[in-house]
Amino acid sequence: MDGLIDKARATADAEERRSLYHEAEARICAELPLFPLWFGVQYHLVNLERFRIDGPVVDLFGEPVLRSFRPLP
């Protein structure tokens, strides 16, 4: 996939470049249910003396899954 994108970026001919990008898009759609276009880093602080974690900490999009955090008595 990377090679196909690199080739498209390096191609001067607009029609050939469009064809290469179209091929890349078709491969992505056929092979992956989700294709992240970018990702970032998020930091979450949790006081483990006050909470127990029962499950995933973040979801697919990097957001905290608050239902996984259980207060300790």
Image (cartoon, rainbow, N blue to C red):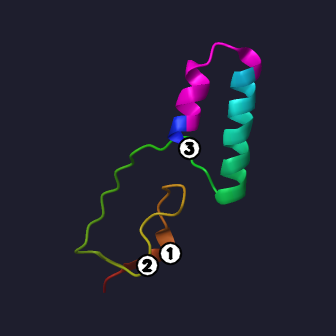
| Image side of residue 6 versus residue 26, left or right | left
Question: What residue sits 61% from the left and 26% below the top?
Answer: 8
State the residue lying farthest toward the top. Answer: 12
Look at the image and say whether residue 5 sits in the magenta stretch. Answer: yes
Q: Secondary structure at mark 1?
A: helix
Q: CA distance from mark 2 to mark 3?
A: 33 Å
Query: Which of the pair 19/46 is nearer the observer?
Result: 19
The residue type indicated by label 1 comes to Arg
Magenta segment boundaries in residue numbering: 4-15
Quarter where residue 33 is shown: bottom right
Majority secondary structure in the magenta region:
helix
- Which residue does the numbered mark 2 point to in the structure image? 55
44 vs 4: above or below = below
23 vs 56: above or below = above
Residue 21: image location, x then y, percent: 69, 33
Residue 19: image location, x then y, percent: 75, 30
| Image side of residue 42 versus residue 16, left or right | left
Q: Are marks 2 and 3 in contact (CB under 8 Å)?
A: no
The residue type indicated by label 3 comes to Met
- For disc 2, the neighbor class at 10 Å (few under 14, some 14 to 19, many from 20) is few
Residue 72: image location, x then y, percent: 31, 83
- Which residue does the numbered mark 3 point to in the structure image? 1
Q: Are marks 1 and 2 in contact (CB under 8 Å)?
A: yes
